[in-house]
Image (cartoon, helix red, strand yellow):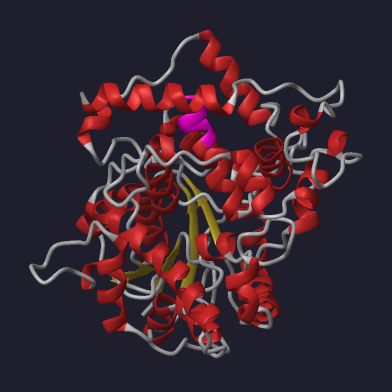
């Protein structure tokens, strides 16, 4: 019995339950559909498209090694899968379950017309299984983490099948090059390849490299000048490695740092559960009182937003982060919090504007994680930082030894000392080609607190 393997953000062969189920049925037609219609405004962003091109090329090569192919189609998933069934006579579709609202809609549309078999495999535990005592999804991370531990460890990862049986006749496929996923004029992703190599093989290599330093994760993860984080986030987002695989490798360390890393992995599951329970999480405040928040609008706010996106705010740690984002499609996690807090609280610009910018520029942009994290910073989320806790970027920069990081991404400041580089203006050391602060910290803090009081009044 020929079946279709519907691939989305699960571009791997190892620990792939849907692939294993399809192989047991008989011949398999692996399919990836580039669907820009179903997601609407949340279609795959620019930086993600760069990654997607290379991830699909890598997956196609791995399938070829096992006697199979990767079929590429473009259009609405439900339409293209129906066409493939008609063309091939396939009787069943296997897929991993996804929880983004557009994928939920797509699964419903496909299941209404075809035999769709969904399995879980992209989480430590399915969101539907981690509920409160009353059967409700958790809104707060700490009780979620306690409940999740009852489902740990996840099952041992499944090995990739040695061979994937091919159908008698292959359907037509698009050429990956014709999708034009890679930027050309200009090629703003020119430096992406210096940091990233997409694909399942590279994900395994990255996990192996990180596992040797898990013991120092707790100490080094907040220091942007060091290689203290796993850099597995884009591989996890595209499903090139399963959370279960990462979990089992991380716990081999067995120390406090390993547990902290697992909690970060669990946070990813938590944001997926929040997204599943509240599909509008990327567009609406979780706390309705923030609907009255006086976000800045107009030309001046637009100019400040452009300064933020281009790394020209006059705050070196903020500018370093935003320039790193543009050049390699990623920001160190500590710096993500700093730049997000700066946009929301120093500039009083709606967190949703920042969410959209990250969606288009991050290679690891994840609807659940991205949205929940921005709402955490803004104070508008169910489980969030208090709005009144305003991060001081200059203090954060010095506290986490970001001098080397700033020199790497803001070269006009590279001649400054470690003391001067965090706040050149304070030492009268600002070079003429570096902008002054667009807003003072004390002024911004007072303005933000006044805006928040107006909401609570």
Return the x and y of residue 81 as percentages of the image width and height.
Answer: 38, 56
The residue at 53%/47% (across/down) is 337
Kindly tell me whether residue 292 is visible in this rendering. Answer: no
Q: Residue furthest right?
A: 415
Tell me which segment is drawn in magenta: 342-349
- In depth, the one of 361 and 15 nearer the eye is 361
Q: Quadrant of the N terminus?
A: bottom left
Q: Is residue 405 above or below residue 231?
A: above
- In depth, the one of 67 and 230 nearer the eye is 230
Return the x and y of residue 280 as percentages of the image width and height.
Answer: 28, 41
Check if residue 117 falls in the magenta segment. Answer: no
Return the x and y of residue 34 as percentages of the image width and height.
Answer: 50, 48
The residue at 63%/49% (across/down) is 331
Magenta residues, dominant SS class: helix
- In depth, the one of 344 and 241 nearer the eye is 344
All told, the count of numbered labels is 0
Q: Quadrant of the C terminus?
A: top left
The residue at 40%/64% (across/down) is 267
């Amino acid at each position: 019995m020929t079946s279709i393997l519907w691939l989305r953000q699960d571009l791997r062969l190892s620990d792939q339950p849907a692939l294993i189920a399809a192989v047991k049925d008989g011949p398999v037609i692996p399919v990836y559909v580039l669907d820009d219609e179903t997601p609407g405004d949340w279609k795959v962003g620019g930086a993600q498209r760069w990654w997607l091109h290379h991830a699909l090329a890598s997956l196609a090569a791995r399938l070829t090694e096992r006697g199979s192919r990767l079929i590429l189609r473009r259009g609405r998933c439900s339409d293209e899968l129906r066409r493939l069934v008609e063309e091939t006579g396939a009787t069943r579709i296997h897929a991993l379950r996804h929880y983004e609202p557009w994928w939920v809609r797509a699964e419903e549309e496909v299941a209404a017309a075809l035999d769709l078999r969904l399995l879980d495999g992209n989480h430590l535990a399915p969101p539907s299984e981690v509920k409160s005592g009353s059967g409700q999804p958790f809104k707060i991370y700490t009780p979620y983490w306690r409940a999740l531990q009852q489902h740990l460890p996840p099952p041992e990862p499944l090995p990739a099948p040695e061979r994937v049986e091919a159908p008698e006749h292959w359907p037509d496929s698009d050429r990956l090059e014709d999708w034009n996923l890679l930027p050309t004029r200009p090629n703003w992703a020119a430096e992406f390849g210096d940091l990233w190599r997409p694909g399942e093989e590279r994900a395994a290599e990255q996990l192996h490299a990180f596992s040797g330093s898990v013991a120092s994760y707790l100490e080094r993860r907040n220091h942007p000048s060091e290689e203290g984080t796993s850099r597995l986030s884009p591989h996890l987002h595209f499903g090139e490695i399963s959370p279960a695989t990462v979990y089992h490798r991380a716990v081999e360390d067995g120390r406090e740092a390993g547990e902290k890393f697992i909690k970060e992995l669990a946070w990813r599951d938590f944001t997926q559960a929040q997204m599943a329970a509240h599909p509008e999480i990327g567009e609406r405040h979780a706390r309705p009182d923030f609907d009255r928040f006086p976000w800045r609008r107009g030309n001046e706010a637009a100019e400040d937003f452009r300064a933020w996106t281009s790394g020209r705010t006059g705050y070196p740690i903020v500018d370093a982060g935003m320039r790193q984002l543009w050049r390699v499609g990623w920001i160190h996690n500590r710096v993500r919090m700093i730049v997000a807090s700066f946009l929301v609280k120093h500039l009083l610009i709606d967190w949703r504007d920042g969410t959209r910018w990250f969606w288009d520029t991050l290679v690891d942009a994840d609807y659940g994680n991205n949205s929940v994290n921005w709402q955490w910073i803004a104070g508008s989320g169910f489980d969030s930082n208090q709005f009144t806790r305003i991060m001081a970027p200059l203090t954060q920069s010095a506290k986490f030894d970001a001098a080397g990081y700033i020199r790497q991404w803001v070269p006009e400041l590279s001649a400054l000392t470690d003391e001067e580089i965090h706040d050149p203006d304070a030492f009268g050391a600002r070079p003429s080609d570096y902008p002054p602060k667009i807003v003072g910290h004390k002024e911004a803090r007072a303005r933000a607190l006044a805006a928040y009081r107006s909401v609570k009044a």
